[in-house]
Structure formats: C-alpha cells, structure tokens
Image (cartoon, rainbow, N blue to C red):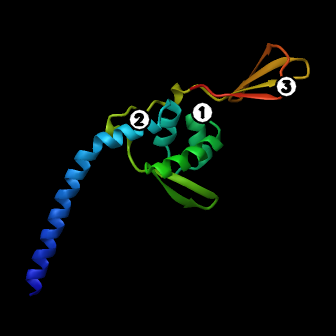
Amino acid sequence: MLEEEKKEKDRIIELLEEMLKWIKVTSIPQVKKLLLDILSSDKEKIAYHYSDGRDCRAVAKLAGVHHGTVATWWKRWTRAGIAEPMGAKRGERARRIFSLEDFGIEVPSPKEVEPLKKEVETPTHKVITRESSEAKVTEGSAMEGEKLEESK
C-alpha cells in the first residue's frame, strides 16, 4: 500500500508541474501588459527593478525620485500583485516579484535618468536650481514657496 501511495503522490506532483508550465506560458502576455501599464515611466521601471530588498532611499536615489514617491509606488505595486511586502527593521519595503528582462522589458540605466531638480526662490528673486550636490543660480521672476520638478 505504501508503494501505491508514493506512485499516486508522484503522479499528482507530475501533473501539477505540467499545469504550472502551461499557466506560466499562457500568463506571460498578460503579466507583460500589466507591468507595462503600471510601470509607465523609466523612473518607475528603474525603481521596480531595484526593489529587491533595498531600502526606500537607495531605490529612490537610483531612480532619481523622492523616497516618498518610491513608498507610494511600493504600495501600488503590492496592491497590483507585482511586488510583495517585506518587513525591515525600519519600516516596510517591497520586493519585486517579476524580472522585467524575463518579459523583454528593457531596464534603463540609472545614469540615463535625469536627477531630481528643485528650484527655490531666494530673497533676491534669483532662482536656484539644485541637481544632486551642485547648485546653479539663474535670474528669475518672483515665485512664492518652493517648486519641485520631476522629469519624466
């Protein structure tokens, strides 16, 4: 009787593996479309690609966006089923479930993404544009507050 049960379990495993192969093959187009719909910008693709256990700030730096943006994306991706939440000592993180390359989706190089730009009005009505650690001063019209500009 033990030998018969083992054969039956092996057959069930064999059938499940075969079913899994077919499910994967038939799901590829739908998953690719979902990834392309959700990850509409290069920055999102970069952030998704590097969401492999890294913290929010590290992913944000690579993608050239604010860390709050990455946190928002992680929530959206988790709800959509393309990422899974993972706990960390200091808050939540998300890990991608799929590799973009497996679906023929090119991952842009982080170097190709323009850095986050921030323009600030100074008391002398000069606009300071900061890119990374550099600051560039240009004459500008009077603005109130700060203006955050992200390139897409």
Residue 102 shows in the view: no
Q: Quadrant of residue 108?
A: top left
Q: CA distance from mark 3 to mark 1?
A: 25 Å
Q: Residue at x 50, y 31 (%)?
A: 41
Work out whether mark 2 precedes mark 1 in sequence or the reverse, and give the earlier one. 2
Specify the farthest residue to the bottom. Answer: 1
Instruction: Please give left or right for residue 86 compared with residue 117 in the image.
Output: left
Residue 151 shows in the view: yes
Residue under label 2: 36
- Helix, strand or loop at mark 1: loop
Q: Quadrant of residue 138?
A: top right
Residue under label 1: 64
Q: Nearer the viewer, mark 2 or mark 1?
A: 2
The vertical placement of 61 against 120, above or below, is: below
- Helix, strand or loop at mark 2: helix
- Helix, strand or loop at mark 3: loop
Q: Position of residue 52 (x, y in %)?
A: 48, 49
Instruction: Please give left or right for residue 131 compared with residue 101 in the image.
Output: right
Query: Label 1: how many residues lie within 10 Å, few (<14), some (14-19) or many (20+)?
Result: many
